[in-house]
Image: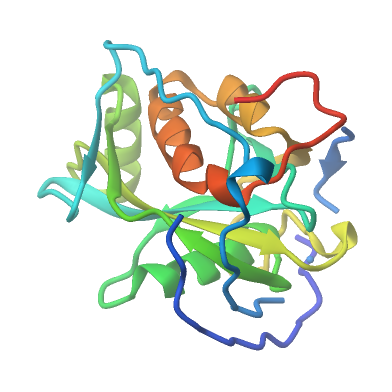
Amino acid sequence: MMVAAAASARLLVTPIAPSTSALHRLPRRIRITTRPPPSSSSSRSCSTSASPLLTFASMDAPPQGYRTNVGICLANPSLTKIFSASRIDIPSAWQMPQGGIDAGEEPRAAAVRELREETGVTSAEIVAEAPNWLTYDFPPDVRTKLNARWGTDWKGQAQKWFLFRFTGNDDEINLNGDGSEKPEFGEWTWMTPHEVIEKAVEFKKPVYEEALKHFAPYLQSDPTASSSI
């Protein structure tokens, strides 16, 4: 496995104010600051219509029986498009980075770590944090597969979502990550919010819609996009 070159990360944390192509195959810092929300005239609206067959909840705290997890919405420097990658094990499944929160780890620290581990990215700033935990159930076959792998019995995942703005160049993105974990993704691209939701697996779509609804005030309209949410 090719290991991404080590890069030093500078962390500058300030409070968050309340208030989104070509494919790149396996080709690589995090400066955490915050940004005030832009005016509503430049924001993108986001649909939150979800299929009634999909289990989804927004909660103040993660419920019992669910794996605590972070979701990472990595936007490009212009805040017009979002990083999405296809899974190595299921090439048709595209998703934003995510990962479990370690014992005693704060969600924000977990998001910084997971972003680095899965994409190699350390040049980024945290723009916003979704206020609630977004919870979804695993479909039965996915639940069986993942719990067998983890040795657990989770019903699903309770996720805390963060919007990051990428401040580096595309060649920093390395799907081998920082070399500390087995790669999960085979290729990646920048997508519009609509495309991110459209290409996500069905059971994650409601969570993606809700997360992007929270981040919509910070995302900029892309004049080249043919559709929006």
Q: Is residue 58 left or right of residue 75?
A: left
Q: Is residue 185 left or right of residue 140?
A: right
Q: Is residue 20 visible?
A: no
Q: Is residue 159 left or right of residue 71?
A: left
Q: Is residue 227 left or right of residue 44?
A: right
Q: Residue at x 45, y 45 (%)?
A: 214
**In the foreground, 37 or 77:** 37
Q: Residue at x 86, y 54 (%)?
A: 27
**In the foreground, 102 or 219:** 219
Residue 29 image point, x, y percent = 72, 76
Instruction: In the rendered view, tell whether residue 49 sits above or below residue 31.
Output: above
Q: Is residue 219 visible?
A: yes
> From the image, which quarter does the N terminus lie in?
bottom right
Q: Residue at x 39, y 23 (%)?
A: 203
Residue 226 image point, x, y percent = 80, 19
Residue 21 image point, x, y percent = 87, 32
**In the foreground, 87 or 97:** 97
Instruction: In the rendered view, tell whether residue 111 sits above or below residue 86.
Output: below
Q: Residue at x 82, y 68 (%)?
A: 168
Instruction: In the rendered view, tell whether residue 76 sits above or below residue 45.
Output: below
